[in-house]
Image: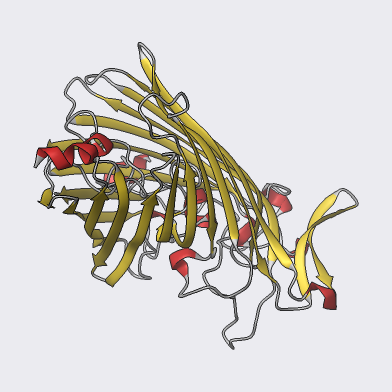
């Protein structure tokens, strides 16, 4: 371990089964808003009646982690370590989910309902609570309402039960913390048998914006999310899918002051804008993303490549670029101003299945640059900048083994690099690498 740390039933179920089936005995790449999204569908408890089916599923993720030093800031590797701690056991997730599907007389999906809880040593919380209505006259529209996953990109929607790496990348966690949000999504996707565009899907969602990071909406701005995607298309040797996404949203100013980057004498700095007209104006959140997924059409020695890039404008505070879950205040409960930055980030994940389909090698690289206007030693307190403007690159590698259809484990190591700046604590690379041994039980 020290070496690693140092080195870096059938009649009425057929329509549902057709929607759920995943190839192979391992997990498929399921998304958090899909039918039965969070677990494998091989062995589900189905309680069925003539027009509907109720099913239960779940998974449990106990894990052990070792950090490079005591008090490692590992928020994006599952949470920061205690001040005098560099190793820990954790229950990262414990999910229990109920799904109900109501069918029409001819067996088409009509209404779908999901309730999912997450329980850990830190408490129990609702993760999904949404309903979906399928329009069956033209068979093209479905509407999802409630607490559900935001339809942006690929990694953000990929369920934690099927991802090979233990956590989503830093960029995904910062831009849309907790993945889910309260709102409505309209999905256009032809569902009749011979539809020429059946593999094309368009999602349009309207959400509060703060997601589960806050207790409720705290301003009048909403996030408008659009995604155009192509479902997996199979060629002779490989399968391809992908999409483009955008988020147009923002946060309402409560103070007559705001901050954004400006250039003076060829030098970028964080400029203060003081004006009474700033109050109630919208500080922008504008994201533009594209993603692609490629995989070979084999079981043994199967290769998979997933990539995504996002850029745009992000509004946070002086100390963090994370989307706030509530209006930011200081330790005296006084309102803080918003800071708007130009950002970019991406990830690249490669998964190689070995000769036996129970073993997989994982390689992942991601970066998040919260302020693309400045780099390295240009980042200083004198320019009005802080740790919120520092770029991070993460290199991860691991080995995943499926013991059986209900139990798997991954050994994964994150090498985290921050750029050297003039900001205290970030003048050199921080010692914050993390080794994770995660197991997962599922039914």
Give the residue displayed 31% in from the left and 70% down from the top: 125
The picture quadrant where one finds residue 415 is top left
Residue 16 picture location, percent across and down = 23, 41
Specify how the rendered protein is coloured: secondary structure
Decide: is 33 above or below 260.
above
Left or right: 432 in relation to 17: right
Toward the viewer: 38 or 273? 38
Instruction: Report if residue 89 is visible in the image.
Output: no
Decide: is 255 above or below 251.
below
Instruction: Report if residue 167 is visible in the image.
Output: yes
Left or right: 78 in relation to 327: left
The picture quadrant where one finds residue 324 is bottom right
Q: Residue furthest bottom?
A: 332
Toward the viewer: 46 or 193? 193
Left or right: 234 in relation to 347: left
Give the residue displayed 28% in from the left and 62% down from the top: 115
Residue 393 picture location, percent across and down = 52, 44
Toward the viewer: 343 or 153? 153
Q: Residue furthest top?
A: 236
Residue 201 picture location, percent across and down = 48, 36
Residue 81 picture location, percent across and down = 36, 65
């Amino acid at each position: 371990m020290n070496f690693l740390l140092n080195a870096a039933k059938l009649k009425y179920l057929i329509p549902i089964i057709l929607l759920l089936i995943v190839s192979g005995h391992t997990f498929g790449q399921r998304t958090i808003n899909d039918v039965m999204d969070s677990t494998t569908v091989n062995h589900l408890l189905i309680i069925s009646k003539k027009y509907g089916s109720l099913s239960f599923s779940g998974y449990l993720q106990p894990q052990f982690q070792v950090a490079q030093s005591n008090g490692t800031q590992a928020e994006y590797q599952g949470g920061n370590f205690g001040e005098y701690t560099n190793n820990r056991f954790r229950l990262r997730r414990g999910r229990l989910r109920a799904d109900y599907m109501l069918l029409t007389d001819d067996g088409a999906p009509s209404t779908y309902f999901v309730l999912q809880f997450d329980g850990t040593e830190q408490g129990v919380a609702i993760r999904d609570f949404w309903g979906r209505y399928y329009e069956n006259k033209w068979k093209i529209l479905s509407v999802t309402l409630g607490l559900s996953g935001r339809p942006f990109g690929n990694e953000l929607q990929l369920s934690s039960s099927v991802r090979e790496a233990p956590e989503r990348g830093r960029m995904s966690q910062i831009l849309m913390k907790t993945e889910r949000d309260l709102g409505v999504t309209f999905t256009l996707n032809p569902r009749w048998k011979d539809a020429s565009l059946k593999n094309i899907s368009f999602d349009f969602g309207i959400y509060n914006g703060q997601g589960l990071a806050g207790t409720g909406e705290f301003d009048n701005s909403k996030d408008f999310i659009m995604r155009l995607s192509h479902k997996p298309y199979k060629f002779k040797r490989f399968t391809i899918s992908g999409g483009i996404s955008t988020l147009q949203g923002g946060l309402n100013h409560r103070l007559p002051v705001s901050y954004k980057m400006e250039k003076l004498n060829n030098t970028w700095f964080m400029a203060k804008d003081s004006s009474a007209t700033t109050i109630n104006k919208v500080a922008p959140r504008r994201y533009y993303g594209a993603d692609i997924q490629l995989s070979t059409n084999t079981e043994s020695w199967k290769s998979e490549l997933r990539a995504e890039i996002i850029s745009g404008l992000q509004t946070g505070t002086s100390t963090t670029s994370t989307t706030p879950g509530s209006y930011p205040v200081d330790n005296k409960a006084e309102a803080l101003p918003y800071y708007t930055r130009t950002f970019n980030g991406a990830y690249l994940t490669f998964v190689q299945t070995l000769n036996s389909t129970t073993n997989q090698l994982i390689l992942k690289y991601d970066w998040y640059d919260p302020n693309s206007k400045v780099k390295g030693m240009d980042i200083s307190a004198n320019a009005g900048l802080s740790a919120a403007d520092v770029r991070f690159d993460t290199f991860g590698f691991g080995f995943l083994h499926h013991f059986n259809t209900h139990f798997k484990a991954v050994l994964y190591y994150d090498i985290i690099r921050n750029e050297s700046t003039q900001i205290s604590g970030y003048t050199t690379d921080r010692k914050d690498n993390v080794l994770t041994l995660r197991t997962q039980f599922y039914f």
